Structures are given as structure tokens and as C-alpha cells.
Amino acid sequence: MTVPVAAGYSRTQIALHWAVAALVAAQYLFNDAIAEAWSAYVKGTAALGFDPLVPAHVAGGVLILALVLWRIALRATRGTPPLPEREPPALAVLARATHLAFYGVLIALSVSGALAWFADVRPAAGAHNVLKVVLLALIVLHVLAVIFHQSVLKTSVMRRMVRPGA
């Protein structure tokens, strides 16, 4: 299947990108509550009191999954803008692979978290922890790529994720 080429990202695509980024940041920042609740569960001890950050983490994971699936659907139907003209071929391949990895890791994180939390699949909890590190590495690579494009290649890659149609 050929993905259509769009003049630029739509408002919806941009909003989804930043919403997922904000949700992922919140998942990392407020991770302690779910980690403590899981640890207490595994040890067979009761968690002390109700922490609203636990269901917030679970809901955040479900929301991330829904938004990522929406992003994939938009990407398949609406398309994406072409890569910058000055994009070296090796970087173009890396960009495509990184985007696919982002989608795959975000989906796998949501599914593994749900399997661990709702179905007590302990290996899924382990996979979830490994995938958190993989996602952090992808985020660092993504941010460094934007900086490289802006400062070295002098492309407008960042503008595409800020201004619709750019």
C-alpha cells in the first residue's frame, strides 16, 4: 500500500503528535505510583490507600494507544509531507524506521502495560519496563534529529510539526 503524500501535516496530525508527547511525558513523570502499586501487588501486600495517579497512569496508557492508532489511520489515509530535499538518503531511511519504531513501541507499551495490569501477565510487565527504555532512546534520537535538521541541514522539519500545511 502506498501512503499518500500531503503538502503538510494537518491540524489534527499536529495536535495528536503533541498530545501523545505530553501524555508520554506525564507517564514518565508520574510513574512512581503505578510502580509502587505493582510492586505491592507482586509482593502480595496491600497498597496503602488510594493513589489517583495509578488509574491516571492506566487511563493514560489507554489514551496513548487510541491516539497512536488514530495517528496511524490519518497517516494511511491523509499521508505525510515529503522529507526535506536536503535529506541524505541514509537519514531518510533512518527517519522512516524511527517513525515505525515509535508507533510499534508505543502500541507495545500500551498493550504490555494492560496485559500486566489487567491480566497479571508478569512477562508483559518485564517487557513494559524494557520498552520504557527503548522509548526514551527513541525520544532522544528524535529530538537530536530535529536539532540536527534545524542547525546543520537548515531544513524546516520542526515547522511542519508546529504549523499546519508547512
Image (tube, rainbow, N blue to C red):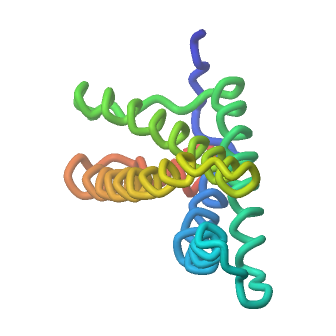
* Residue nearest the viewer, comparing 21 with 77: 21
In the rendered view, would you say 164 is above or below 40?
Answer: above
Q: Is residue 82 left or right of residue 21?
A: left
For image coordinates 66% across by 72% down, the residue present is 44
Quadrant showing the N terminus: top right
Q: Is residue 14 visible?
A: no
Count the labels in the image. 0
Q: Is residue 129 left or right of residue 154?
A: right
Q: Quadrant of residue 101?
A: top left
Q: Is residue 84 visible?
A: yes
* Residue nearest the viewer, comparing 91 with 85: 91
Quadrant showing the C terminus: top right
* Residue nearest the viewer, comparing 22 with 30: 30
For image coordinates 40% across by 38% down, the residue present is 98
Q: Quadrant of residue 93?
A: top left
| Relative image position of residue 116 (x, y in whole percent) | 65, 53
In the rendered view, would you say 102 is above or below 20?
Answer: above
Residue positioned most to the front: 44
For image coordinates 75% across by 46% down, the residue present is 66
Q: Is residue 100 left or right of residue 146?
A: right
For image coordinates 73% across by 49% down, the residue present is 119
| Relative image position of residue 106 (x, y in whole percent) | 56, 47
| Relative image position of residue 87 (x, y in whole percent) | 28, 33
| Relative image position of residue 53 (x, y in whole percent) | 71, 79
In the rendered view, would you say 12 is above or below 50?
Answer: above
Residue positioned most to the top: 1
Residue positioned most to the bottom: 49
